[in-house]
């Protein structure tokens, strides 16, 4: 968790206070480079969105390099009032000592689709690690989609990321995550030190709905290619759909039907705890079938929950 009373200038604002020992123990003062907290190392992005008639507008924006966005665009013919926001970062990716935090507040009746402009590269970390915190709030009857491009962990990289969702009971939140094996052409397949990813969802009153933790890499004692983990597959993807617009069991059926004929993937869909929705987890032989399967699941979730298909973002 981050400290709510901290200011943007304090490390407690952009660094988790309860880092796992596997990653906290890898922190050393960085010599010969920019230290944690230096300009360009702390990326902050804060967005507030509100419903204005039939259109959702961005009402407040704060950004600090290397994170930034351009003007929201409206590209979904089925949901013409929904803005699509592409989060971008200066440079080629996350390096040791980088601390990113993204806060998005989608107000009652508003909608937003958040994604990235490109995959997130994570570079080698010899003395420290990188973190990425994403806090999403969905008000009553809001629709929030957070579907970033894949994470590409390079040899020796260490990344801790956490997504925290605060979702009103009448809202719908769709979140996706994809992990690639690294720079395969450079012989770096699953050669990262640590990839630690957490997701936690709560109601506005603090009631926990669900939580998920993914730990992979040498520092976690979990070789990705071992039986019971990736078992020889290249790509791991997850899609969470938090909604009470239909029974979770019906959502699971829709997701399974969409995934059953997807080539090159092993996929499963199951109900989330507390009747809050459903989740998909899939393994793929490469990025192409993983991308196709994730799109099929996203499309099925949209059709089941809000009755409209997923638009073509023309990625990949």
Image: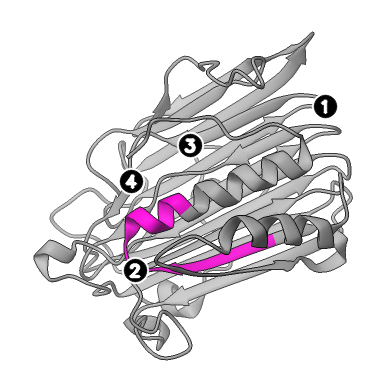
Which of 198 and 40 lies nearest the eye of the viewer?
198
Residue 207 visible to the viewer = yes
Mark 2 falls on what kind of element? loop
Residue 175 among those drawn in magenta: no
- Find residue 264 and report its horizontal and vertical position in percent: 39, 66
Residue placed under numbered mark 1 in the picture: 108
Cα distance in 3D space between marks 4 and 2:
18 Å
Residue contact at pointers 2 and 3, CB within 8 angstroms? no
Kindly identify the residue that appears in the image at 34 percent across and 50 percent down: 98
Name of the residue lying farthest toward the front: 261
- The disc placed on residue 198 is none
Dots 4, 2 in contact, CB < 8 A: no
Measured in 3D between alpha carbons, the distance from the residue under mark 2 to the one under mark 3, in whole angstroms, is 23 Å
- 51 vs 139: above or below: above
Residue position for label 2? 285
Q: Which residue is found at the position 71% from the left and 30% from the top?
A: 106
Residues tagged 1 and 2 counted as in contact (Cβ below 8 A): no
42 lies left or right of 243:
left
Density class for disc 2 (Cα within 10 Å; few <14, some 14-19, many ≥20) is some
Answer with the quarter of the image where residue 170 lies: top right
Q: Which residues are magenta?
A: 279-292
Residue 216 vertical position relative to residue 260 in the rendered view, above or below: below
Nearer mark to the viewer, of 1 and 2: 2
Between the residue at mark 1 and the residue at mark 3, the CA separation in whole angstroms equals 21 Å
Residue for badge 3: 115
Check disc 4 and report the residue beneath it.
119
Q: Position of residue 312 (x, y in %)?
A: 47, 30
| Residue 57 occupies quadrant | top right
299 on left or right of 263: right
């Amino acid at each position: 968790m981050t400290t709510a009373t901290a200011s943007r200038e304090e490390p407690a604002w952009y660094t988790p206070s309860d880092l796992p020992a596997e990653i906290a123990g890898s922190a050393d003062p960085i010599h010969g480079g920019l230290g944690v907290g230096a300009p360009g190392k702390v990326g902050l992005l804060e967005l507030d969105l509100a419903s204005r008639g039939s259109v959702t507008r961005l009402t407040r924006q704060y950004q600090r390099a290397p994170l930034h966005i351009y003007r929201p665009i409206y590209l979904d013919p089925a949901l013409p009032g929904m803005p699509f926001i592409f989060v971008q970062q200066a440079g080629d990716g996350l390096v040791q000592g980088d601390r990113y935090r993204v806060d998005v507040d989608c107000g009652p009746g508003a909608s937003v689709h958040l994604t990235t402009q490109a995959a997130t590269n994570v570079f080698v970390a010899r003395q420290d690690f990188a973190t990425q915190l994403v806090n999403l709030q969905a008000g009553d009857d809001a629709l929030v989609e957070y579907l970033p491009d894949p994470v590409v962990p390079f040899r020796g990289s260490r990344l801790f990321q956490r997504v925290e969702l605060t979702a009103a009971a009448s809202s719908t939140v769709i979140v996706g995550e994809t992990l690639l094996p690294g720079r395969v052409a450079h012989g770096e397949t699953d050669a990262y030190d640590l990839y630690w990813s957490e997701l936690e969802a709560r109601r506005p009153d603090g009631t926990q709905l669900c939580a998920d933790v993914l730990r992979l890499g040498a520092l976690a004692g979990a070789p990705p290619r071992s039986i019971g983990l990736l078992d020889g597959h290249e790509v791991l993807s997850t899609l969470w759909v938090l909604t009470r617009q239909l029974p979770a069991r019906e959502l699971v059926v829709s997701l399974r039907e969409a995934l059953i004929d997807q080539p090159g993937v092993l996929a499963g869909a199951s109900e989330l705890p507390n009747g809050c929705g459903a989740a998909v987890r899939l393994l793929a032989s490469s990025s192409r079938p993983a991308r196709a399967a994730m799109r099929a699941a996203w499309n099925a979730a949209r059709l089941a929950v809000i009755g409209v298909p997923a638009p073509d973002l023309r990625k990949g």
